[in-house]
Amino acid sequence: VQLQASGGGLVQAGGSLRLSCAASGRAFSTYGMGWFRQAPGKEREFVASISGSGGQTVYGDSVKGRFTISRDNAKRTVYLQMNSLKPEDTAVYYCAAKTPWTTSSFRTDYRFWGQGTQVTVSS
């Protein structure tokens, strides 16, 4: 599967952005999907994950209550709605796909990665 992330940009603190990740290929619902982020000089950090059906979600502690992951299997797209953004959310955001369809917070579980989209939150 190939992944294309989009929707990043520059936003003020307290604002919102919605990231999208479009997948190519068939059987999108058989993949668990995740979002990770990487700030300069830091390791790639888990943000959120969603199961193949969309029925299960998991979030990193730093984004709980502010970010929401969702997916539309008919459109082969996963979304990350980011609200109440903070300067510390500034990073390159990556979407990733794994098999089987379950959620995971472990970067090494994901086999396929998108190219990343930059999110910058100004104070």
Image (cartoon, rainbow, N blue to C red):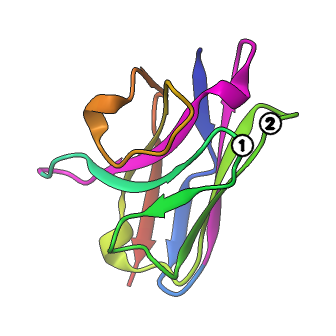
Hey, what amino acid is under mark 2? Asn
Describe the element under mark 2 as helix, strand or loop.
loop
Quadrant for the C terminus in the image: bottom left
What residue do we see at 80% from left, 36% from top? 73
Please state which amino acid type lies under the numbered disc 1: Ser
Residue at image coords 30%, 73%: 88
Compared to 12, does 79 lie above or below?
above
Residue 60 lies, in percent from the top left, at 36, 65
Tell me: 36 left or right of 117: left
The answer to which of 48 and 86 lies nearer the viewer is: 48
**Do callouts 2 and 1 mark residues in contact (Cβ within 8 Å)?**
yes
In the image, residue 82 sits, relative to residue 44, either above or below, namely below
Residue 13 falls inside the magenta stretch: no
Q: Which percent across, then down, holds residue 99?
A: 49, 24
Q: Nearer the viewer, mark 2 or mark 1?
A: 1
Specify whether 30 is left or right of 113: right
Query: Would you say residue 19 sits in the magenta stretch?
Result: yes
User: Which residue is disc 1 drawn over?
Assistant: 53
Q: What residue did someone put label 2 on?
A: 73
**Measured along the vertical axis of the image, is residue 25 above or below residue 12?**
above
Counting residues from the start of the chain, the first of labels 2 and 1 encountered is 1
> Local crowd at mark 2 within 10 Å, few (<14), some, or many (≥20)?
some
Q: Between residue 90 and residue 31, name the one nearer to us.
A: 31
Q: Picture quarter containing residue 5?
A: top right
Structural crowding at the residue carrying mark 1, measured as other residues with C-alpha within 10 Å and reported as few (<14), some (14–19) or many (≥20): some
